[in-house]
Amino acid sequence: MDDCIVFDDAAVARGGTRIWQHGTFSIETGSVTAIVGTNGTGKTTMMQVELGLIPLAAGRVTVLGEPAGRANDRIGYVPQSYTDDIDSSLTAEQSVLLGLTGTRFGIHPVTRAQRAKAREAMRFVGVEDKARMRLSQLSGGLRQRVAIAQALVCDPQLLMLDEPLANLDLASQRSVVHVLARLNRELGTTIQVVAHDLNMLLPILTGAVYLLDGHPHYAAMDDVLDSTLLTHLYGTRVQVVTTPQGDMFVTPNALDERDGAVPDTHDVEEVAEFHDHDHHGRQHTDPKEVA
Ligand SMILES: Nc1ncnc2c1ncn2[C@@H]1O[C@H](COP(=O)(O)OP(=O)(O)OP(=O)(O)O)[C@@H](O)[C@H]1O
């Protein structure tokens, strides 16, 4: 399989501060990857770098075979809190059409072909019957699916979603995950998702980029589901539980609650187990390699 996203010793700074550095990893075409890390570690920044919206302080990032930013017409992007920010007096269909017309200002004669394309995207995410409803009339879950339809309407090869499950009830989270699974399986779309809670996404994830101690790393899902690594990623002690049916989920360590303990999972030496740097400043990407 070829690579969809390639980081080569990439670093980024914001407001004069290095957010992360020494990012060297590849993400395969056709994969479903989470970007994981505690608040402020630079997950949204990573997506903005991939879109070429923020320049790199060092290194290179290639997306869909081109330098970051050049392939944006083949990328669908659903920003964080997008559904809160968009004009909620728009109808679902008008909102999806924005994915084709690009702006809500000015008069945009909509062609029959564009309308058909918008309907197709709405059908895919299951909101076709809501086309004429205003966003303000829709639930958070339906608005998120409209936002995904808007990102889909240009037939992207890569879909990037920043916290698409935040503030959604369980049923709405499931339906969004179901849409992502079908997109990946039926259309072969590569998917990248910023997520704080991995549980709902576990059945579809193939790997994760995790931001730890100022470095991005990539690991396949089997390696990510290591309780010690996850404990550092979540910033609190967690365990991975497997049900008799074989489903896995991540849960806070019950013993801590009983003891009233407040574990410090940011110990520098412990975190250092999960990455190591050779003399070229590159980190090993497999946590098992260095643990
Ligand atoms: N426009 C900006 N100018 C300067 N610094 C910024 C800007 N936007 C974000 N930052 C800083 O960059 C760092 C990374 O921010 P980013 O939003 O990428 O983190 P995140 O991991 O997505 O956080 P969260 O989980 O809270 O959404 C933070 O320390 C933040 O304060």
Image (cartoon, rainbow, N blue to C red):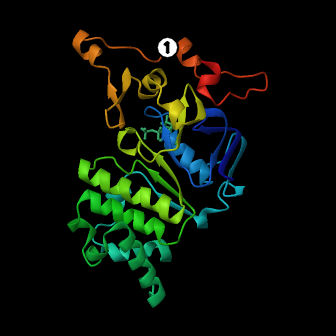
Tell me where residue 164 appears, x and y as whole percent.
Answer: 38, 51
Classed neighbour count for the residue bearing mark 1: other residues with Cα under 10 Å, few (<14), some (14–19), many (≥20)? few
Above or below, 42 against 149 in this view is above
Of residues 198 and 41, the one nearer the viewer is 198
Identify which residue is drawn at 67% across, 61% down: 70
For residue 251, side relative to residue 286 (left or right): left
- Residue for badge 1: 267
The residue located at (50%, 32%) in the rendering is 224
Residue 18 visible here: no
In the image, 116: left or right of 59?
A: left
Horizontal side of residue 129 vs 241, given as left or right: left
Residue found farthest to the right: 280
Q: Position of residue 213 (x, y in %)?
A: 56, 25
Percent from the top left, x then y, of residue 98?
Answer: 44, 73
Which quarter of the rendered picture does the C terminus lie within?
A: top right
Q: Quadrant of residue 262?
A: top left
Against 6, is 264 above or below?
A: above
Left or right, residue 249 beside residue 225: left
Of residues 158 and 15, the one nearer the viewer is 158
Which image quarter: residue 252?
Answer: top left
